[in-house]
Image (cartoon, rainbow, N blue to C red):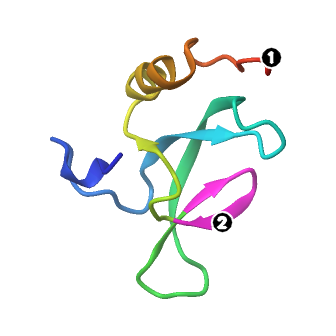
């Protein structure tokens, strides 16, 4: 989801966003996580997501949402149960 084109101001360092994180071992398991938008510690002028104590470049690999409600709505659409892990099977 391209949150830059929604009715919100552009994302900047210090913002909190919500991402859907998939389990790397079971692709039909995911959850919603809060992430901070921070300045890239290496590349000046670029932004990162700070999630799980790690910097991740902001790119199309992440489904980003401005509010937890938006993330939960998308989660419900894709996985069926907002905010909860969906068991494999």
Q: State which tag comes first along the sequence, 1 or 2.
A: 2
Q: Is residue 85 above or below residue 24?
A: above
Front-lying residue, 77 or 18 = 77
Front-lying residue, 75 or 7 = 75
Determine the secondary structure under disc 2.
Answer: strand
The residue tagged 2 is 55
Q: Could you classify mark 1 by the number of other residues whose Cα lies within 10 Å: few (under 14), some (14-19), or many (20 or more)?
A: few
The part of the image, by quadrant, that contains residue 6 is top left
Q: What percent of the width, then of the height, locates residue 3? A: 30, 48
Q: Is residue 51 magenta?
A: yes
Q: Is residue 85 magenta?
A: no
Residue for point 41% across, 83% down:
45
In this picture, residue 39 sits left or right of residue 45: right
Q: Could you classify mark 2 by the number of other residues whose Cα lies within 10 Å: few (under 14), some (14-19), or many (20 or more)?
A: some
Q: Is residue 61 above or below residue 67?
A: below
Q: What percent of the width, then of the height, locates residue 19? A: 53, 41
Q: Are marks 1 and 2 in contact (CB under 8 Å)?
A: no
Residue for point 57% across, 46% down:
35
Determine the secondary structure under disc 1.
Answer: loop
In this picture, residue 79 sits left or right of residue 25: left
Residue for point 32% across, 57% down:
11
Q: What percent of the width, then of the height, locates residue 5? A: 19, 51
Q: What percent of the width, then of the height, locates residue 26? A: 80, 36
**Residue at far front of view:** 89
| Region rendered in magenta | 49-57
Q: Is residue 41 above or below residue 66?
A: below
Instruction: Specify the quadrant that holds the C terminus.
Output: top right
Q: Is residue 45 above or below residue 59?
A: below
Residue for point 49% across, 17% down:
76
Magenta portion: prevailing SS class: strand
The residue tagged 1 is 89
């Amino acid at each position: 989801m391209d949150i830059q084109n929604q009715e919100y101001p552009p994302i900047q360092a210090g913002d909190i966003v919500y991402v859907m994180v998939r389990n790397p071992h079971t692709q039909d398991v995911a959850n919603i996580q809060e992430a901070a938008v921070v300045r890239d510690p290496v590349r000046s002028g670029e932004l990162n997501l700070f999630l799980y104590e790690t910097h991740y470049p902001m790119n199309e690999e992440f489904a980003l949402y401005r509010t937890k409600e938006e993330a939960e709505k998308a989660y419900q659409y894709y996985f069926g149960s907002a905010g909860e892990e969906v068991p494999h099977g």
